[in-house]
Image: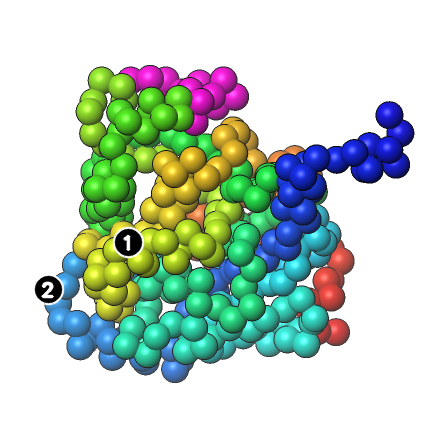
């Protein structure tokens, strides 16, 4: 059957699928200039106001500047030209080199979309739980942290298929983390919230293929098998990479848990009673609103250390599609690591993008 005749005889279902594949996808990226004096003063003032007894996550590693954001834009321009709009979420500052007049760029300040009652905020969860309020945001969007870099060509179907997020449903027990105690509480809170709305065994019966997909990494396939021994969710593994999200899922969760989410957003810093945006991804999966695939391979995760040879080689040679360059190590030689990573990016992305001023 020729392509012309094939198009003529498409079923209504096939036509709907084709329309879904063409639906726009936006990117959302959050950024903070930890060196901004006004931002520091406002943050310090809020820290004092909160007192010493509050369980917050105020690590310096969460805010220090690696000065490599321009390479994020170079990667997007080169490897994801199909993106409709980039919503650049910021406290108020923007990099001096950023071309704010680029037609695909939308500068979004916290005050533009976060309700006033939750401002000022230095809590990433408050910011993330309000993305659906961003003016002009598409139904389907990818959320990037500013440490997630595109290093090779990616397609829309890597993230969304048939109007659904592409993701991996993997169970993993929550474990104590002495280096980041707050997040251990948050991961447990996530599991408790999801268990409130989804019965584990019933969900496994309803969509066994979501748990036992032959394409999943063996480690997480085995985790899912072993989890059958426990009647309740013990935790979830969420791939640390760009998050494929739907605006309508946000609206569903705000309708389901308005009091809890208002409480989370009222915390100006990360708090041990928070739930994170990972709940949104897991909600989509448990609802069956996703396409199951091994998404683990798409993004390689690196904790920056004093020995970053694999990361540097990946950046220079573009040997993978996405790299997450995570700054969580307290004891590294920061200036040395920063110089090495910046040099690798300069070699891997020598050409300036249209998102940069001349």
Which of labels 2 and 1 is toward the front?
1
Residue at (54% x, 64% y) in the render:
137
Local secondary structure at mark 2: loop
**50 and 105: which is toward the camera:** 105
- Where residue 111 sits: x, y (%)? 41, 78
Residue at the disc numbered 1: 256
- Residue 191 horizontal side relative to residue 9, left or right: left
Q: Looking at the rendering, in which quadrant would you find the N terminus?
A: top right
Quarter assignment of residue 309: top right
Residue at the disc numbered 2: 53
**250 and 244: which is toward the camera:** 250
- Where residue 105 sits: x, y (%)? 63, 69
- Where residue 208 sits: x, y (%)? 39, 22
Magenta region, residue range: 209-226
Classified by dominant secondary structure, the portion drawn in magenta counts as: helix
Residue at (41% x, 32% y) in the render:
169
């Amino acid at each position: 059957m020729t392509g012309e005749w094939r198009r003529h005889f498409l079923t209504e279902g096939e036509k709907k699928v084709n329309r879904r594949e063409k639906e726009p996808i936006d990117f959302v990226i959050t950024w903070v200039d930890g060196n901004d004096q006004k931002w520091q003063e406002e943050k310090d003032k809020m820290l004092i106001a909160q007192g010493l007894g509050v369980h917050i996550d105020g690590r310096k590693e969460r805010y220090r500047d690696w000065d490599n954001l321009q390479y994020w834009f170079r990667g997007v321009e080169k490897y994801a030209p199909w993106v409709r709009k980039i919503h650049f979420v910021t406290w108020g500052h923007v990099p001096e080199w950023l071309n704010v007049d680029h037609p695909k760029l939308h500068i979004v300040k916290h005050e533009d979309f976060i309700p006033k009652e939750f401002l000022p905020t230095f809590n990433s969860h408050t910011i993330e739980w309000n993305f659906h309020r961003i003016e002009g945001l598409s139904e389907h969007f990818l959320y990037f942290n500013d440490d997630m870099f595109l290093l090779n060509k990616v397609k829309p179907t890597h993230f969304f298929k048939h109007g659904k997020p592409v993701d991996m449903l993997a169970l993993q027990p929550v474990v104590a983390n002495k280096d980041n105690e707050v997040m251990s509480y948050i991961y447990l809170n996530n599991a408790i919230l999801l268990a409130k709305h989804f019965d584990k065994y019933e969900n496994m019966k309803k969509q066994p293929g979501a748990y036992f997909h032959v394409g999943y990494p063996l480690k997480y396939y085995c985790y899912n098998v072993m989890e059958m021994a426990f009647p309740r969710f013990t935790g979830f593994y969420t791939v640390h990479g760009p998050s494929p999200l739907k605006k309508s899922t946000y609206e569903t969760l705000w309708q389901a848990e308005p009091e809890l989410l208002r409480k989370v957003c009222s915390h100006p810093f990360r708090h041990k009673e928070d739930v994170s945006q990972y709940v949104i991804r897991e909600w989509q999966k448990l609802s069956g609103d996703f396409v199951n695939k091994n998404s683990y391979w798409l993004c390689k995760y690196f904790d920056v250390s004093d020995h970053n040879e694999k990361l540097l080689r990946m950046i220079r040679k573009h040997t993978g599609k996405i790299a997450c360059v995570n700054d969580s190590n307290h004891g590294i030689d920061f200036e040395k690591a920063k110089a090495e990573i910046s040099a690798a990016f300069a070699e891997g992305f020598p050409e300036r993008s249209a998102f940069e001023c001349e």
